[in-house]
Amino acid sequence: MSTNGIGAVFVTTHNWGRTAKFFQAMGYELDFETDHNSGQLRNGDGPYVFVAEVPNQEPSTRLVLMVDDEEKVELDPGVEVVTPFEDTHYGTREMVVRDPDGRDWTLLAPKK
């Protein structure tokens, strides 16, 4: 299995507006904003940043590795699968795996 590299960074925050302004000050442009305190920002052709306000959780960051086809993903038996591929509310398929140091990584595939 190979990935297509980092496609996105998911960030949770206590304050959507303040975090969006930070990324805009760093040269990112707002792609879209939702009506529930989240949105996507982009800087050129690089990975996009998706920010979601989650006031009652510790802020976190997760890198997203892109895959062309979930059916072609063959993980080594030593890779811990946290959640298998499942539909997302934003129209993709997502799997979470954990590396040996305990970090979670998201694999994102197009929905068929």
Image (cartoon, grey):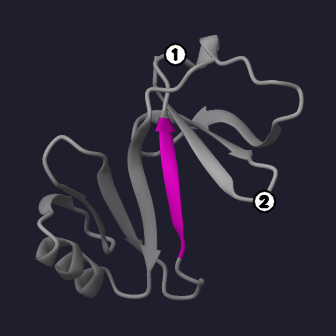
Residue 43 quadrant: bottom left
Q: Position of residue 32 (x, y in %)?
A: 17, 57
Is 96 rendered above or below residue 24?
above
Relative depth, front residue between 9 and 12? 9
Specify the segment rendered in magenta. Answer: 60-65
Residues tagged 1 and 2 counted as in contact (Cβ below 8 A) = no
Relative depth, front residue between 39 and 106? 106
Q: Position of residue 7 (x, y in %)?
A: 38, 40
Is 45 rendered above or below residue 19?
above
Does 84 sit left or right of 15 as displayed?
right
Residue linked to disc 2: 102
SS category of the residue bearing label 2: loop
Relative depth, front residue between 90 and 100? 100
Please say whether residue 64 is one of the residues in the magenta stretch: yes
Relative depth, front residue between 64 and 112? 64
Residue found 43% across the figure and 87% down from its top: 14
**Label 1 environment density (alpha carbons within 10 Å; few <14, some 14–19, many ≥20):** some
Q: Amino acid at mark 2?
A: Gly
What is the magenta segment's predominant secondary structure?
strand
Q: Residue furthest front?
A: 101
Q: Residue furthest right?
A: 77
Q: Amino acid at mark 1?
A: Asp
Q: Residue furthest top?
A: 72
Does 112 sit left or right of 58 as displayed?
left
Residue 4 quadrant: top left
Q: Position of residue 12 (x, y in %)?
A: 46, 73
Is 1 rendered above or below residue 91?
above
Q: Position of residue 62 (x, y in %)?
A: 53, 59
Residue linked to disc 1: 69
